[in-house]
Image (cartoon, rainbow, N blue to C red):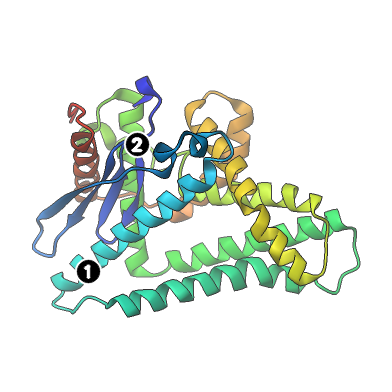
Amino acid sequence: MAKDNFSYGGQAIIEGVMIRGRTGYATALRLADGGIQVARHPWKALTQRHRLLNLPIIRGTPALIDTLIVGYRSLMASADVAARGEGIEPPSAFQYGLSIAFALAVVIGGFVLLPSAVIEGLHWHALLLNFVEGLIRFCFFVLFIFGVSLMPDMRRVFQYHGAEHKVINAFEETGDYSEEEAAPHATVHRRCGTSFIFMVLFIGILVHAVAGWPVWYWRLLSRLALLPLVAGISYELVKLAGRRKSSRLLGVLVAPGMWLQKITTREPSPEQVQVAVLAVEAALELDGAKSAA
């Protein structure tokens, strides 16, 4: 991977792992009977569809959109498989739509509007208000993921998250992603989505400070309007930190995100690592790359 500057990576899904490659994404799911279902899906990233979308900073938003679409599809497919494995009828499209609407309401209400509302009556300098708002938003995020981590089902997802990181770390460092090679590697990774979210929160404080502290509805609009810039800068920093692991400065920038991964990842079982290995192998096969496991 490091040889051609392409970064494989993915996410944990229900009882499985999704890995994105150059030409598509692959999923590996542990079935109720103990078997493993592997699926390969061709997918052309938005950054590959037009050269302008692959320019630095600009490419952050298309990359985020791709991640959300592919991640959602993989997660819903894994939920369907898990439901059928338990003899339950999978949720309908309407039910999935309601879950998305609820998630958006939580994100917009809890992480955008509420932090601003908490300090609405304070008459401080705009820079201080933006800093405090960002700090409250960060605290809400930490409390949210900590609360989620207490759910038994999510703990298993976080174990698969750790398995994905172990296998990707092994692949990046040695070119080998076998279960034996992946076992001693860390469950955290610099390019993890958790690190990206922290970077968005941090960069958001700096960028929003430029917009001042207008009335709440203009403030909300400014947050949304500046999101592509915030996401673009955050994407470049996390991507650079993943490539230049010897950089101390980049290491300091991503350190809080790495600490947060102690919540969003867990040490996986050998069976879970096996699932992650098969997901990476399928992504490589989809790209026509030679298997190294």
* Above or below, 69 relative to 60: below
Picture coordinates of residue 119 (x, y %)?
79, 70
Residue 259 in view of the camera: no
Tell me which numbered mark, 1 or 2, is placed earlier along the sequence. 2
Q: As shown in the figure, which amino acid type bears the numbered disc 2? A: Tyr
The residue closer to the viewer here, 42 or 278, is 42
Report which quarter residue 33 is drawn in: bottom left
Residue type at numbered disc 1: Asp
Q: Secondary structure at mark 1?
A: helix
Q: Which of the two residues, 267 or 101, is positioned nearer the viewer here?
A: 101
Q: Which mark is residue 80?
A: 1
- Residue contact at pointers 1 and 2, CB within 8 angstroms: no
How far across and down, in percent of the image, does residue 1 sit? 34, 27
Residue closest to the far top: 3
- In the image, taking residue 114 as reference, residue 10 lies left or right, namely left
SS at mark 2 in the image: loop
Residue 156 drawn at (x, y percent): 31, 60
C-alpha gap between disc 1 and disc 2: 25 Å
Q: Is residue 16 left or right of residue 235?
A: left
Mark 2 lies on residue:
8
- The disc placed on residue 132 is none
